[in-house]
Image: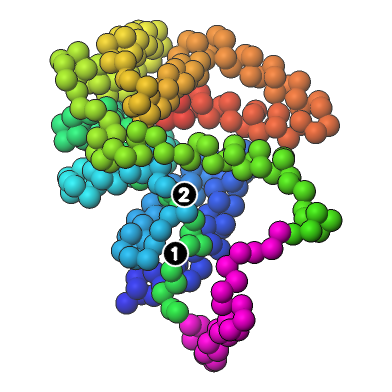
Amino acid sequence: MSLARYESFLLNNVSTISTVESSLRSLTWFLPGRFKDAELASEALSAVLNMISMYHDTLLARITYSDPKFRPVIPFSLHTRFTKAWMDKNSIYKWAARMLEIIRYTELVIEMGMRRKVSSRNRWRGIVLLEFIKALLRLLLLKITRRPLLSTPIPERDFDPTTIPSSNQTSPTLAPTSPRSSPRSTPDHLKNNHIPLDPHPLLATPPDESAESVLQDYLLPKALDTSAVKPSISLVRPFSSPQDWLSEILYILRPLVYATMLYRNRRSNKPLLTILAMELVSRNLRRNPSPSAVLERAEYAHRDRDILWYLFRGSVWDTYTRPKLEALADRMSNAPLLGIFGVLLNDWIPLIDEYYYYTAP
């Protein structure tokens, strides 16, 4: 009963709740360094918000899709179409993807708790166990879809919350409004007048070229292409060769190999060099998607950008990136307006040294 009340409250205040979620999530960036265990409070708040948002998205999507009158103003993104199609088609995919996201939301909080409660060796055992579970879930998703895995395997909120129908058509605290009167009928002498008169040149509004340009820039990316008419599951083509499978399996196993090697020796450069080699081999083995494979190309571009995270790992971080960031933070702290960013940067640098999941692959 209480859950039904909460869902009713969510539907009636969805815009306000979304604003509160966004505000609290922004607050988590400023908590580390403010007080003792502030980073734990920040990550715990962030994990709770992510879990609540995932529940809200699931509930709102179910209500939205069940409404026969709902028509999105802008078509759903390719990512939403693809992931929703697989979640509707396969229940194992749905629960494995959700479990994978829950671990991703909470893994840093779990590591922080282990760092405070258990020994360093047991903490790394827990990290290896988490990476093992994540690898199993990703391999399970790979077996189900037979396609490259997306970085986020569940649909994201891809609609305006204000368009969701309210659970109550009328407010329970207000008297119902009086029914609208029927529209006035058209006079007889105007019924045959189907041709409007041209407006006078002095009264016509000149066209706003800048507004028209902005409108075109907004509408052109929304124009239909070949992806818009494909079946949702066919947005990503299945693997067709052993090379494709090997590339994806290597990419999936990278985090597990990295955590296992760090557990054995955290001072060696071998873990970083090994997963970098696995990353490059996977990248060279993967297929080259066609220009019409928009979703697959976007996923590969995301993976290529993630290579920059190697600047925050291992000896590259210790000898190159951290000294430069510390020097930048010192320079920013002397500037009148940039000082706050320098303070935040100084608060975040030690966390990268202490916790694996801040920069984990």
Instruction: Tell me, for residue 164, which label it has, or none.
Output: 1
Kindly tell me whether residue 159 is visible in this rendering: yes
Residue 114 x/y as whole percent: 37, 37
Amino acid under label 2?
Ile
Residue 256 x/y as whole percent: 28, 23
Up-down relation of residue 353 to residue 86 (above or below): above
Q: Residues within 10 Å of mark 1 (few under 14, many from 20)?
A: some
Residue 68 x/y as whole percent: 33, 65
Kindly tell me whether residue 154 is visible in this rendering: no
Residue 192 included in the magenta stretch of the image: yes
| Residue 140 horizontal side relative to residue 258, left or right | left
Residue 40 included in the magenta stretch of the image: no
Residue 315 x/y as whole percent: 48, 10
Q: Give SS at disc 1.
A: loop
Q: Report the residue at 31% width, 9% height from top.
A: 284
Amino acid under label 1?
Ile
